Amino acid sequence: MCTSFLLKASDKGCVYGRTMEFGIPLNSMLMVTPRNYSFQGIGIDGKPGSGINWTSKYAAVGMNGLGVPIFADGINEKGLMGGMLNAPFTAEYQDVSPADSANSISSIQVLQYALTNFATVDEARAGFEKIFVNRSTVPQYNNSTFPLHYTLHDANGKSIVIEYLKGKLVISDNPIGVMTNDPAFSEQLNNIGQYANLTNVEKPSPVIDGVTYRSPSSGNGLHGLPGDYLSPSRFIRALFLSKSVPISYSTIEQVNVAWHILGSFDIPPGAITLPDSNPYGGGAGGVEITEWSIVADNKNMIYNVKMFETTNIYTFDLKKIDVNTKAIQYYKLDKPQMPIYVN
């Protein structure tokens, strides 16, 4: 399970927040890739180099997973940012022929391909129309195809969702900036109409036969906002919380707001316990947790991460990247809890 959203600031900045949940440890590290790095595309046989091989145009930073040098989430030096989210009930990739394998990549490489090649969502839209995403399997994921869909936001505040549904590429504009898991994005949008009564503005107490029935507290406008962990519920919750933020907030203020919104999706250990047959997990009795959360600011080019183990916030400044280094760099985010003592 994952939840993501975009906050637009009064000073033209954009702040992207997301959580990463899974039923098995992803062992993610912060990963930095430079410009002019040679990437090997994974073809239909699952082998690096049998797909598209490309040289990165842009440096990028983000979180990897399962020890694989791919981005599960990230931002590049042009401010394009986004992530991949689990979609086991809808993701079905293209049936790529052997002749087209050299023009394809694995599902786990889609975000990496986007962040290292494109500066805007319009460029990404055009780029993915020209290549295939195949059904190759991932050894680290039980030798199965990793079923994902993808969210992208750029420095202009535009957003798209990239999906592969029934073997076809589907790219949708995302005017609300929100994304979770299954079902398909179009169904998530259609579901919004079911919550037409919700508003962040307080409603007056009802008066019936001359008697006023007061609300027990403030907050009656969002009464009925779903609070469970199902993907459609999280989609609606992320939508209303992100769209309720005052439009006067600056980018720096929106960064702080994003952490508060993300707290609404943080899964306490044991709240979701998955059997081994559940495609959102992968291990028998897997306890799904929020393994990490990120807040990315593409105005100030800052990428922030909070890991499950502590409340530390790790901050990476993209303005300080050595874009011409020759190797991928990794940072293990495992510092002990660092409180600020006041006495």
Image (spheres, rainbow, N blue to C red):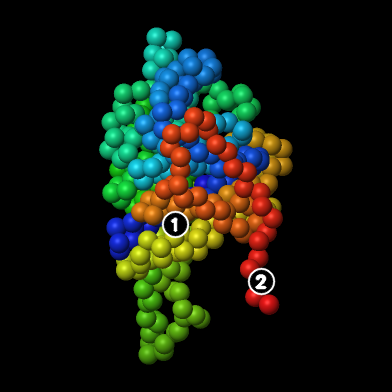
In the image shown, does 95 or 328 lie closer to the viewer?
328
Residue 55 location, x and y as percent?
40, 25
Residue visible at 61% across and 58% down? 312
Q: From the image, tell me which residue sits under label 1.
A: 238
In the image shown, does 340 or 94 lie closer to the viewer?
340
x%, y% of residue 227? Answer: 52, 60
Q: Which quadrant of the figure contains the C terminus?
A: bottom right
293 shown above or below 212: above
Q: CA distance from mark 2 to mark 1?
A: 33 Å
Q: Residue at x 32, y 48 (%)?
A: 155
Quadrant in which residue 113 is drawn: top left
* Relative depth, front residue between 203 and 300: 300
Residues 37 and 322: in front is 322
Disc 2 designates what residue? 341
Q: Of the numbered discs in the image, which one, if any, rests on residue 2?
A: none
Residue 259 in view (yes/no)? yes
The image position of residue 85, as x and y in percent, is 49, 41
Residue 84 position within the rendered picture, expressed as x and y whole percent measured from the top left:
47, 39
Question: Could you tell me if residue 289 is visible in this image?
Answer: no
- Element marked by disc 1: helix
